[in-house]
Image: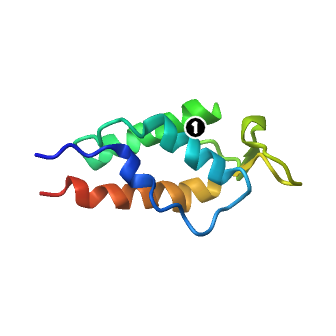
Amino acid sequence: MTVVKMACLFDPEPERWGLRGDPHVWRALRDHRSGTDVPASIDETVSLLRATFSDLMGLDLGNPAASVYREQYSHGGISSGMVSLDTWRERLLPMLTERARPLLEP
């Protein structure tokens, strides 16, 4: 069986983001997990992605806020550093999950 690294889930980057901080979180998540093997199940993959997101953001995606500001993802511009939790819950995390699915199915 071929071992696949998490890095493959992050390429290509999405064409649309929620807020200006989202691509910086995407790249931080990719960089943090790129050398990690894709877990053996979808549930484990989602758990790992959510846990890493929580570590990088300092909050869980279960937080009811629609968006948050994080200085480490601010790289210039009016709304820089704003991260859309709604976009991560509704589109970006599901995208990563769907990219993992064919890698885990027999």
As drawn, is 10 to the left or to the right of 35?
Answer: right
Residue 53 lies, in percent from the top left, at: 54, 39
Residue 50 lies, in percent from the top left, at: 48, 41
Q: Nearer the viewer, residue 4 or 94?
A: 4
Q: Where is 51 relative to 96, above or below?
A: above
Q: How many marks?
A: 1
As drawn, is 29 to the left or to the right of 84?
Answer: left
Residue 57 lies, in percent from the top left, at: 63, 36
Q: Nearer the viewer, residue 86 or 24?
A: 24
As drawn, is 80 to the left or to the right of 84?
Answer: right
Instruction: Tell me the residue that label 1 is attached to.
Output: 60
**Would you say residue 61 is visible in this rendering?**
no
* Mark 1: amino acid: Asp
- Asked which secondary structure carries label 1, the reply is loop
Q: Quadrant of residue 40?
A: top left
- For the point 57% across and 40% down, the residue is 28
Outermost residue toward the bottom in this view: 15
Quadrant (top left/top right/bottom left/bottom right) for the C terminus: bottom left
**Would you say residue 74 is visible in this rendering?**
yes
- For the point 64% across and 31% down, the residue is 58
Q: Quadrant of residue 37?
A: top left
Residue 99 lies, in percent from the top left, at: 36, 60
- For the point 64% across and 63% down, the residue is 17
